[in-house]
Image: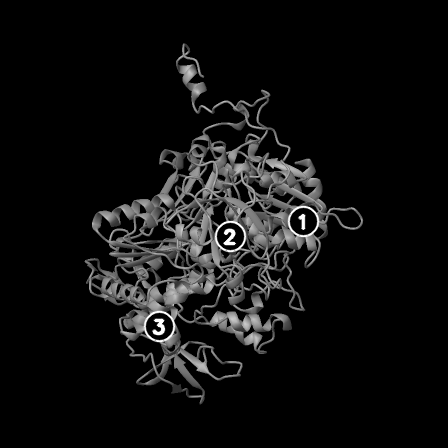
Amino acid sequence: MEIATSWLAPIRARNPDELAFFTGRDQSQALTGWWAQQFGTVNYAAHGGFCSVNMAAGGLYTLGGSFWEFGEPDWDHTQYLMLWGVAEDHDSNPIKLGLGKLKARGAKIVAVNPVRTGYGAIADEWIGIRPGTDGLFAFALIHELLRSDRIDLDYLVRYANAHWLVVRNPGGADDGMFARDGEGHVLCWSRAGAVRADAIDIEPVVVGEYALPDSRTAVPVFQLLAERYLDPRYSPDAVSERCGIPADTIRRIARELAAAAFDSKLSLPVAWTDSWGREHATMEGRPVSMHAMRGISAHSNGFHTCRALHVLQLLLGAVDAPGSFRFQPPFPKPVPPGNRPGKAKRADGGLDAGPLGFVHGPEDLVVDADGEPRRIDHAYSWAYPLSAHGMLHTVVRNAWAGDPYRIDTLLMFMANMSWNSAMNTTETMHWLTDKDDAGDYRIPRIIYSDAYASEMVAYADLVLPDTTYLERHDAISLLDRPISDADGAGDAIRHPIFDAATQPTDDGRPRDVRGFQTVLLELGARLGLPGMVHADGSPQYRDYADYMVRHERTPGVGLLAGWRGEDGSLEGKGPPNPDQLQRYIEHGGFWHAPVPESGRYFKMANRDYLRWAHGFGFVANDQPIVMQLYSETLQKFRLAAQGHGALQPPERHRERVATYFDPLPIWYEPFEHDETSREAFPLSAITQRPMYMYHAWGSQNAWLRQIQTRNALYVHPDTGAKYGLAEDDWADVDSHHGTITVQVRFAANVQPDTVWTWNAIGKRRGAWKLAKDAPEGEKGFLLNHLISDVTPKGDYANADPVTGQAAWFDLRVRIRKAAHAGMSEPQFPALPFGEADERPLRYGAASRNREHPGKTTP
């Protein structure tokens, strides 16, 4: 702690941005983001930039909510579920329980995925799509729904912006912007002419072209949508070959979606009142649900693909209606959410807002006067404007290169950036240890915290040993990644069942470890950061558990919403309760507040829900949230790239911004899938995480290692035969970036133009205290070695141009029989960590022996 403080204090005094603080897959972003804000660095992000930001941004800029863990299918009422790119590693148990309900009820499940595992294996239909073409498939379904007039126009006008007027003025500064009256209210066209689009008891038109009172021309959003997606290039016949899906199958799926949505006549006898005061005796359903995850998100076209799925849902009226995708509190939020990324310093040295947020226009970018990035990861720059989660995958290269400046210290928590969380692994390991001409490290200092001797630990100058989950407090907070369900808000705690200091070690000494959150708070106190010390300089918080109870983000709002107030009688908002954690423990670690029955659907415009949500602080007011088929935020960036407005991109970014910031969803080839690349590297290569080994940390669980200690490259038998491979052959796999040698297994559960493997199984020898000849190190492997961190052209990060999400699944490869066999390649020098005890690990043996002294343990 003294060393860390001595490194960080001069940075805080000199220039807080010289600290780059990036965290991996943790559940503490409400704390870590606040800590970075108080330190004053703009250089903070969590793992979402290489995990799910396309999904989050695509949803939050369209619906005000998103797939992933922030929404769910209506498991009790849906009759037709489409799973898009869903593996089994996120939200696994709730999804399995929900799928059980659907199977018992006879609902149809369709899995859209290049690989058929897990959920797809129990689906009624598997659509073996070619990676990166999900958006085309969605557009073909939209084309068919529009062509056959099987859409819910009433829903689109009531809850979305289908009727809003868009100015048509090619070349003008207002082209593509919404038409507004003198007070700034968006207009639509009705029999009375141009009127406010949010007025009630009007009959707006959704097609046509109209002259505004100021003589400008405008068209409704729906007109633009119909013009685009009725184009023959989006017909099933036009997209079939590229997607690998028969045109007749696409047409049939479209018919089935429409039949499930409109012919089921689902109606719940629940009275409710909408935001405009109109009373409804029933809740009319659209029992079509969709759920999507990294399979569509982790592509360079993933943002627009996510938006395409949301447009498909909206056309069916299948967002937060009975039977459809449902928002989980605290969602939906206004579109886009109100919090913008912090970039200015307060008088006390902290940032004026959290380092992460949502841009509403070019004015919110974190760039300097010349339009160049101010963040080390280039998030919120003209290259990646909507990078709402930051860009963890670019940090190491940019810090090494000093782009846009040199940093002093890289502080990381649980982010295995030298191995399975890195693209371009070989070069990344080089960058972490490279020196300049003067002999100094290009990244001067690395502070790293982990509970295990992961590959990244070897590159740290200072290690802050973390606890295991059994030895710590954690908050699964509504301010972070909530565990709500659609029928209620929820949060939870994790509390220790062991004291780390009492746990036996090989040398008999106490385990000198502390939870990283507690360490951060102590570091903050030692540094005198605002909010972490009293006026006399003493620590504000004893440890993370104390912070969980007493910290207030705003008066009455803390990390935990349950049992607030001095007597624990309040929920959502209220003063801290010193006994709060005990109340959670008494309730199994969970708190849950049901949404009123009348507020459980149509949350975006349900008066009872929005008032309930406002009471909890989820939304700033109880006004309806309008879902955005057409995004004016994106159009603002396009106009800037076309030369309009006070803030415009540097010349080298103009064409890129103008191309990809289309206000309606578009589809383009993933950057590594152009025709030349497809000819040279004819196969797509993707990974999945097994549900039983979530990220690399599962390698420390002896029970899970018995399931799988190595991975293979799974190849369709026809593909194997085409390239002269037999079962268990060793093969060289090439990409434009490198070559790996792996063992091949045949599997017919994969689209023939795709190969795949499990991620995070392969380890670097010597890491994780595994035995020196552990299969994970000798035969396990990573596809990461084949993935470049920049595009094939080398001009930008290998990422989505809108959000900066890492394009893990754009990878293209070719495969050939290897000249040698027996060990995966590449291999790197073993890390000098101690090896694991070779004796079998017997969980619970010591406690059993205490209970039965006469027994011995083998």
Q: Earlier in the sequence, mark 2 or mark 1?
A: 1
Query: In the picture, which quadrant includes the N terminus?
Result: top right
> Residue 292 appears in which quarter of the rendering?
bottom left
- Residue 713's place in the image compared with 168, above or below, is above
- Residue 780's place in the image compared with 332, above or below, is above
Residue 363: give its label: none
Residue 579 percent coordinates (x, y): 43, 35
Residue 223 percent coordinates (x, y): 37, 79
Q: Amino acid at mark 2?
A: Ile
Residue beneath disc 2: 815
Residue beneath disc 3: 235
Q: Is residue 16 visible?
A: yes
Disc 2 to disc 1, C-alpha distance = 29 Å
Q: What element does badge 1 sit on? A: helix
Q: Amino acid at mark 3?
A: Ser
Residue beneath disc 1: 431
> Residue 285 appears in which quarter of the rendering?
bottom left
Residue in front for this viewpoint, 735 or 403: 735
Residue 233 percent coordinates (x, y): 39, 74
Residue 744 percent coordinates (x, y): 47, 45
